[in-house]
Image (spheres, helix red, strand yellow):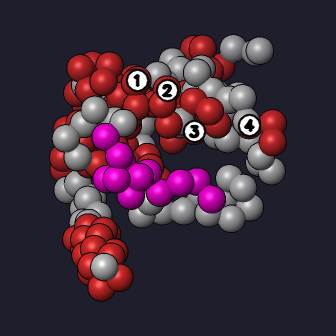
Amino acid sequence: MRNRITAIATTVTLAFGGLAVAQKTPEPSKPGADILQQAAGPDVGEAALGSTIYLRYCAVCHGRSLKGDGPIAVGLINKPVDLTALAAKNKGTFPYDKVVAMIDGRQTTRMHGTPDMPVWGDVFTLTEGTDAPNAEIAIKRLTHYIWSSQTKAKEAAQPK
């Protein structure tokens, strides 16, 4: 009986370990593709699907408004970034590839003094909570939602 339990535990461990090793980080898009996507703007359908992912995984820190005012933001060392101002801070161009990289974990963030923002690419791979067929599509949908929520230049320039 003990050998059977050990065998089952070993099989489960190897299976999950194999999943972790088999994960492939999405490759950055080609420079020309980014320019074409910028011209087209965010995909409204992907953005709509991304809003659900955002509310489930991101709003707790970044807030429903995407402005960094989520319910646990006050307990963090550094305030979460205002996701509605990413294009404004990047000379009017939404930094699509950088946002994808931040979400999927290819880049670190210093939000909490250390790179403590979850590596969502890994999380999305292990959960079905995104309603997406895979992590890359979940990240794409989330990025299009954030992109679609950018403040317009006039709104960003107005005093608060």
Could you tell whether 49 is left or right of 113 in the image?
left
Residue 120 placement (x, y as % from top left): 44, 51
Residue at the spot of label 4: 73
- Contact between marks 2 and 4 (CB within 8 A): the answer is no
Residue at the spot of label 3: 89
Q: On screen, 141 above or below 124?
A: above
The amino acid type, in three-letter code, at marker 3 is Lys
Q: What's the residue at 54%, 62% (across, down)?
A: 108
The amino acid type, in three-letter code, at marker 1 is Ser
87 or 114: which is nearer to us? 114
Of helix, strand and loop, which one carries label 1? Answer: helix
Of helix, strand and loop, which one carries label 3? Answer: helix
Residue bounds of the magenta highlight? 116-128
Residue at the spot of label 2: 55
- Contact between marks 2 and 1 (CB within 8 A): the answer is yes
Q: CA distance from mark 2 to mark 1?
A: 6 Å
Earlier along the polypeptide chain: callout 2 or callout 3? 2
- Contact between marks 2 and 3 (CB within 8 A): the answer is no
Residue 50 placement (x, y as % from top left): 35, 28
Q: What's the residue at 81%, 36% (across, down)?
A: 74
Could you tell whether 25 is left or right of 85 in the image?
left
Mark number, residue 51:
1
Q: Residues within 10 Å of mark 2 (few under 14, many from 20)?
A: some
